[in-house]
Image (cartoon, rainbow, N blue to C red):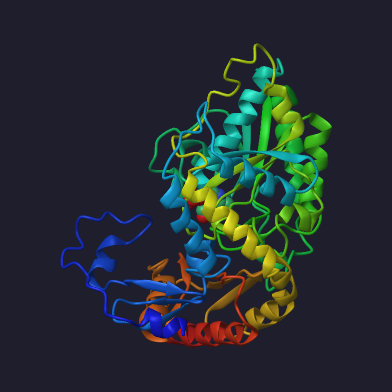
Amino acid sequence: MAQSSAQAKPTAVPNDLEPFWMPFTSNRAFKKRPRMIARAKDMFYYTPEGRPVMDACAGLWCTNAGHNRDPIVAAIKAQAEVLDFSPTFQFGHPKAFELASRIAALAPGDLDHVFFCNSGSEATDTALKIALAYWNVKGEGGRTRLIGRERGYHGVGFGGISVGGMVNNRKFFGSLLAGVDHLPSTYNREQQAFSKGEPEWGAERADALEGIVALHGASTIAAVIVEPMSGSTGVLPAPKGYLERLRAICDKYGILLIFDEVITGFGRLGHAFAAERYGVIPDMICFAKGVTSGSVPMGGVIARKHIYDAFMKGPDYMVELFHGYTYSAHPLACAAGLASLDLYRDENLFERAKKLEPKWADAAMSLKGLPNVLDIRQVGLTAAIDLASKPDAVGKRGYDAMEKGFHDAGIMIRGMGDTLAVTPPLIVSEKEIGEIFDKLAVVIKAVA
Ligand SMILES: Cc1ncc(COP(=O)(O)O)c(C=O)c1O
């Protein structure tokens, strides 16, 4: 039924593709042979001609409830009819408060205040700014140093790229923020190749924080930011015990710990937040993507009570935090967020992801032994396959796989250099899991 409605009329495509400067895209190659998407429903995208393409990426790790789900579409429509926009600077609308309460209720421990923005990049910059301002209001303004991690991805704002650890996202953009250090990456192929879930090796990589403290002094360090699973650098799950160890070192020196859960939030690792999977409570959680199941841009930061409380002093007519976005808690995003959380709850989608994980992990590992496969990683409903690079053409094999996947095999996979990532909507069926990895096998052989 979904398929037939989505196959309706072919969608017209403009002749001139030139004016759109596409983000994170090889524009010239795309415009020669576009991978155009016109519609979507549940697990599928449809090209303008109506050809189905299985979405093995949940869009960009975001449509966790599947595409164009009726309750989310209805909620957005209904909200647009009654309140298109209202400011959240000095005014409020009910759904913003309702959604904040619902998100806080899903978060572990006393992570109980939610600051809204519109994307993951804004979420990480917001958390970094809250951390710096927190130390100021606490009278420890000397704590300005921010610690990220090699191979971390925290979006594309200046804060995010400064603490991030992806060379191409940093090297073109000048000197970035001063006073930033990086922990070493937790990935080591020799020790971890073909691990299912969290690798056994690597918890000790957290100890590098001790070295940074020894170098600069704890009284200069504001916060550490890490992803519980780095998605954009190729699905790097936290090694067993790593996050616990990081939390312990942060506690020892009074350093704030921020989890960037822009990908791992809202069910991707089988829990509302990865913090719950690992039993580690950070001081702040960044979220975006799955909060509205990708339907309307939204992001945010969940802060622990002690963070929020630190700002609540001075005359009560004064603004406590000089930060915010025109579209923070936009009514359409809030309506979409509430409908998404209802769907996650009503369909037990986080639990479903957890139950499917062993099957997913086995299916992912079944690709071991195919040509050029150097490593496969998996955690939650997420997996990545490292392919050997072509001599003198790093990234070409991954690009070709992504392109062949779309045009020939009818599957959307994410190519990141020569690493292929898959991370489907949480509604994926067992049969579709089989299909995803069958199609991947075809594609990997085709680019051998
Ligand atoms: C961990 C993480 N943080 C931040 C971002 C940036 O999110 P956005 O693209 O919504 O700005 C991403 C995007 O993939 C992400 O994976």
Q: Nearer the viewer, residue 234 or 410?
A: 410
Q: Name which residue lies at 57% across and 69% down.
A: 423
Q: Percent from the top left, x then y, of residue 136?
A: 65, 18
Residue lying at the far top of the rendered structure: 315
Q: Nearer the viewer, residue 301 or 196?
A: 301
Q: Name which residue lies at 70% across and 29% down.
A: 308
Q: Percent from the top left, x then y, of residue 359?
A: 71, 81
Which of the 4 quarters of the picture holds residue 193? bottom right
Q: Can residue 13 be seen from the camera position used here?
A: yes
Q: Left of 202 or right of it: where is 71?
A: left
Q: Name which residue lies at 58% across and 84% down.
A: 432
Question: Where is the C terminus found, in terms of image quarters?
Answer: bottom left
Relative to 122, does residue 346 appear above or below in the rendering? below
Residue lying at the far front of the rendered structure: 82
Q: Name which residue lies at 69% across and 71% down.
A: 353
Q: How many marks?
A: 0
Q: Can residue 163 be seen from the camera position used here?
A: no
Q: Percent from the top left, x then y, of residue 380?
A: 68, 67
Residue lying at the far left of the rendered structure: 15
Relative to 429, does residue 162 appear above or below in the rendering? above
Q: Percent from the top left, x then y, of residue 277?
A: 77, 58
Which of the 4 quarters of the picture holds residue 408? bottom left
